[in-house]
Amino acid sequence: MATDTFLATAGMFDGVHRGHRYALQALGREAEARGMRPVVFTFTQHPLSVTAPERAPRLLTTCAQRVQLIRSVLPEAEVVALNPADGILGLTSREFLESIKEKYKVGAFAMGFNNHIGCDRATAASLADAPLPIVLFEELPDQGISSSAIRKAISESRFDDAERALGHTWQYCGTVVRGKQLGRTIGFPTANIEALEPMQLLPPLGVYAVDVSTADGATHRGMANIGRRPTVDGSDAPISFEVHLLDANDDLYGQTLCVRFLTRLRDEKRFDSLEALRRQLDADAEAARTFISSTSSSEL
């Protein structure tokens, strides 16, 4: 029977991809074998956003998504999100292990062969005299899978490749805020989406076929535009992210939407008139419906 002592592991776990899942499942098995409970330490933001903001990557998941995904893989685990701005990044590996041993009742710490902890970037091999027993995970299969490789796939609009590496769908979640409502005047009302996490990764500028999950749990077909809206705002306008639902016209203001990108339809471009833009949006909507319909048919 498991005790109140924890077997811990720590990492960013951005995306909670197949490699992460392998490690989490190994953590669960090892914890059960030792009569311990598993605990997973992640971070509220990427540590580089504190230590070297210019090198911090865009994130595949918000902290809330990450915690939910970890729990979906290992329901019995405690998940603790540490704030890297709270000084934890200044701790040596020994200080970090001593801290979690005292604060969280950690009885052992699990690491992969190429993981490191602490500001001294200690590996499992260098922690022979650690204040906690170190459990070494077996080498993970599919070593080509990494959060950085998945970010690259998304930045190249290779969504199928990204989701194969993740082992689950990838969604960008944000809150619907009020925009200029110009889309309504040409028959294409849009939901303007503001990121929940400022460092969330977006695909490149362009128009996409998407699935949109709303707060009531429904999923709608849609198309999305990421860009500067050069026809109405000019080429130097801030980048915006807006979604048009193909099968609904609900009031979405204030809701959190999660958008799954299916395929890239075209580049963003400037049109000479709103009428020309409307005609293109008609064509985009038809292209999105055709793609979604063909995809749905192939899955039957």
Image (tube, rainbow, N blue to C red):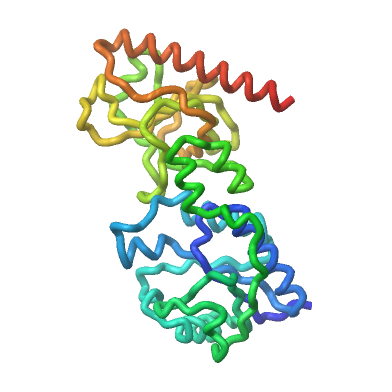
How many numbered circles does the render carry? 0
Q: Quadrant of residue 136?
A: bottom right
Q: Nearer the viewer, residue 171 or 55?
A: 55
Q: Give the percent coordinates (x, y) of residue 217.
A: 59, 37
- Looking at the image, residue 14 sits to the left or right of residue 186; the answer is right
Q: Is residue 82 above or below residue 262?
A: below
Percent position of residue 85, x then y: 35, 69
Is the residue 90 above or below the residue 292 in the image? below
Left or right? Give the position of 24 relative to 170: right
The residue drawn where x is 58% and y is 68% is 40
Horizontally, is 61 left or right of 32 in the view? left
Residue 274 in picture, x, y percent from top left = 29, 12
Residue 186 rendering spot, x and y as whole percentages = 35, 13
Looking at this rendering, what residue extends furthest in the right direction? 1
Quadrant placement of the C terminus: top right
The quarter of the picture where the N terminus appears is bottom right
- Residue 68 appears anywhere in the view: no
Residue 182 shows in the view: yes
Drawn side of residue 22 relative to residue 225, left or right: right
At x 63%, y 47%, the residue is: 167
Whether residue 259 is situated above or below residue 142 in the rendered picture: above
* Residue in view at x 37 percent, y 40 percent: 194
Q: In the picture shown, does residue 61 fall above or below 285?
A: below
Name which residue lies at 49% across and 42% down: 153
